[in-house]
Image (cartoon, rainbow, N blue to C red):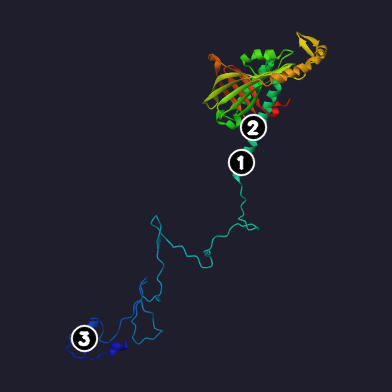
Amino acid sequence: MALLFTYPHSSPLFSTNPSNPFPLRSFLSPTLSSSLSFPKPRTPTPGLRSLRLRSSLSDENSDPVPGSGDELAGPPPKVTDEWGEEAEPEPEPSSSTKLADSDPPKDEDEWGGDGFVGIDNGGVAKLAEEEEVAAVDDKLAELKRCLVDTVYGTELGFRASLEERAEILELVNQLEAANPTPAPTSAPELLDGNWVLLYTGFSELLPLLAAGSTPLLKVDKITQSIDTSSLTIVNSTTLSSPFSIFSFSASATFEVRSPSRIQVQFKEGTFQPPEIKSAVDLPGEVDVFGQKINLSPLQQTLNPIQEAVANISRAISGQPPLKLPIPGERNRSWLLITYLDADFRISRGDGGLFVLAKEGSTLLDQ
């Protein structure tokens, strides 16, 4: 205010000349009295900053300048929700309730773990699968052993009764239904090898089996050798008598027609020279039409000629085998492999059923 009243008198606002058309009284207000006065200051309107004149001579304790950030803060802004109603803004949390910027605490146990117990679902599933496979293997082993025990004593099926044949077929059907090798022709590691015949219903083998049931002739073994690398099959038969051992075979080639079926074509038959025994080996007795005949006297009669028999055996053993082609239209056949594992095989052909065990299998131990 000191600046207003020290202004030079030549100012038109405060001139003392009566002719001045703009006296101070008329300038301030036409209705004011002749005495010089000032209106009372108004109460500041809420929400508006009060402004003050600042003297150039003010010191550091003077009022803050507007916009400097020291002025009084106004009322908080109003917040409107999605329905258009006014709501109070949520208060900001104090520094004492704010969470730290670090990760939230973990539920750790006393060993520093994360408090959770992991379950190896893959390991549990693998263990269950191994147990299931073991159970299936045990069932198959039991069925195979039961089948081998049933065919034992039937002379490869020649002397099997109707009840035994029915039981054998039932066991065969159960094994075929649980075949662990659905594509046998694609499993050479299982199919290759020498297979020993345990039972057959092949009609063309019946004459041979009938001859093997005579007192002086026995079917020692019938085998089938399979080689998938050369696509060959060799069927061999060994017969024995008190004087010699006879063996012959039939070789064939085959073609794979499906994952479980092969087409077989026989080529030739081979007859090995008989192997003469150095000693005549007669059974103690034979059964002829239900009559027991003792052969001990005949054995004593043949003892003097055993040396001559040995000489004949040495002479014949050096002879080459006799090979004959297999003619005719019946040199073709097919074979369907219905069950196969590491030591057991079941096949069905155009001539019947074949049950075989691989040579060296414990199933052959009787």
The residue positioned 30% from the left and 83% from the top of the image is: 38
Tell me the element at label 1. Answer: helix
Which class describes the residues within 10 Å of circle 3: few (<14), some (14-19), or many (20+)? Answer: some
Mark yes or no: residue 345 visible.
yes
Residue wearing tag 3: 23
Badge 2 local density, few (<14 within 10 Å), some, or many (20+)? Answer: some
Check disc 2 and report the residue beneath it.
Answer: 136
Residue at 35% over, 87% down = 57
Where, quadrant-wise, is the N terminus in this rendering?
bottom left
Between 180 and 316, the residue placed more toward the observer is 316
Point out the tag, 2 or 3, that comes first from the N-terminus: 3
Compared to residue 252, the image places residue 207 above or below, namely above
Q: Left or right: where does residue 204 sit relative to residue 212? A: left
- The reply to whether callout 3 and callout 1 are in contact (CB within 8 Å) is no
Which quarter of the picture shows residue 301? top right
Figure check: 94 above or below 332: below
Q: Position of residue 274 (x, y in %)?
A: 69, 18
Q: Secondary structure at mark 3?
A: loop
Up-down relation of residue 50 to residue 330 (above or below): below
Res 262 quadrant in image: top right
Q: Position of residue 196 (x, y in %)?
A: 66, 24
The residue that disc 1 covers is: 126
Horizontal side of residue 203 vs 258, given as left or right: right
Q: Amino acid at mark 2?
A: Val
Q: Give the residue type that dot 3 points to.
A: Pro
Of labels 2 and 3, the one closer to you: 2
Viewer-closest of 240 and 66: 240
Of tags 3 and 1, the one toward the viewer is 1
| Of callouts 2 and 1, the N-terminal one | 1
